[in-house]
């Protein structure tokens, strides 16, 4: 299966999500370099299904939670699953950040959302609960962490090395391609539930490697 071009990754994303396409492109760059055929066996040892599949490296449990069926090596299916779980994760992160005074800068939410995918939602919620949503401060505390050192967190804010504004729809059609405001409003309806879930999880989840 051939690699997608960055423009194709963004086009797929903008058809199914109003979250930032820069977040999507940066995630796909670091997960697979836009390769929808990549499958990593044993990549997620703590999951019932330890294989991650496709463009954004998703497992079957994540697919089931998104209620999106089909082949995860199909980039459209993979993108729909990633968009769904990212929106749900973002709702939890927004609630946690609000409890600590909000994000330090608008782009910080995307770095923590990528952290939730790469390191686990529990890790992202734990560090926000302790230090707030400050990506620059997180990088200063953890400069050697691969997620930081390899530029993953920064690239989901900027779109990464292959980003171009030319990838965005020119006619204004399709979902919002900026900060994902529509999705944030929609998921505000479940913010109370996300807050309660986070409070329960906070006392139980361990941060991998003790890094916060």
Image (tube, helix red, strand yellow):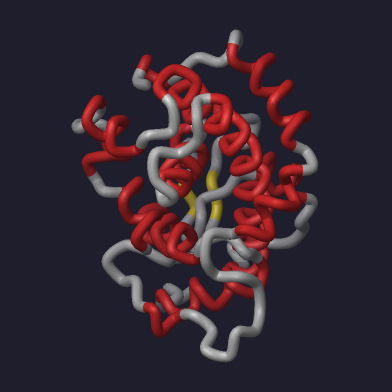
Q: Position of residue 140 (x, y in %)?
A: 22, 31
- Count of numbered marks: 0
Q: Residue shown at 60%/48% (left/top)?
A: 86
Which quadrant would residue 88 be assigned to in this image? top right
Which quadrant would residue 203 be assigned to in this image? top right
Q: Say left or right for 153 vs 21.
A: left
Q: Say left or right for 16 vs 111.
A: right
Q: Position of residue 22 (x, y in %)?
A: 43, 63
Q: Say left or right for 211 vs 42.
A: left
Residue 49, placed above or below residue 14? above
Query: Which is nearer the eye, 62 or 210?
Result: 210
Q: Position of residue 130 (x, y in %)?
A: 44, 17
Furthest residue toward bottom:
171
Q: Position of residue 35 (x, y in %)?
A: 44, 65
Q: Residue shown at 74%/61% (left/top)?
A: 70
Furthest residue toward top:
203
Query: Which is nearer the eye, 148 or 183?
Result: 183
Q: Residue shown at 75%/52% (left/top)?
A: 186
Which quadrant would residue 198 be assigned to in this image? top right
- Quadrant of the image containing the C terminus: top left
Q: Say left or right for 153 vs 120.
A: left
Query: Which is nearer the eye, 195 or 159?
Result: 195
Residue 16 appearing in the image: yes
Residue 46 appearing in the image: no
């Amino acid at each position: 299966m051939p690699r997608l071009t960055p423009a194709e990754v963004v086009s797929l994303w903008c058809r199914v999500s109003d979250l930032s396409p820069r977040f999507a492109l940066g995630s796909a760059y670091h997960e697979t370099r836009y390769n929808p055929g990549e499958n990593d066996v044993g990549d997620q040892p703590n999951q019932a299904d330890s294989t991650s599949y496709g463009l954004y490296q998703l497992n079957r449990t994540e697919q089931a939670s998104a209620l999106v069926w089909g082949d995860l090596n199909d980039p459209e299916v993979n993108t729909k699953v990633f968009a769904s779980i990212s929106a749900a994760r973002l709702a939890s992160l927004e609630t946690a950040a609000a409890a600590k005074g909000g994000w330090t800068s608008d782009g910080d939410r995307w770095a923590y959302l990528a952290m939730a995918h790469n390191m686990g939602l529990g890790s992202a919620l734990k560090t926000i609960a302790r230090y707030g949503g400050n990506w620059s401060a997180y990088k200063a505390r953890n400069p050697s962490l691969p997620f930081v050192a390899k530029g993953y967190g920064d690239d989901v804010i900027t779109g990464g090395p292959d980003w171009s504004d030319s990838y965005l729809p020119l006619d204004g059609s399709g979902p919002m391609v900026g900060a994902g405001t529509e999705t944030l409003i929609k998921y505000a309806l479940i913010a109370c539930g996300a807050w309660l879930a986070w409070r329960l999880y906070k006392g139980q989840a361990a941060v991998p490697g003790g890094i916060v």
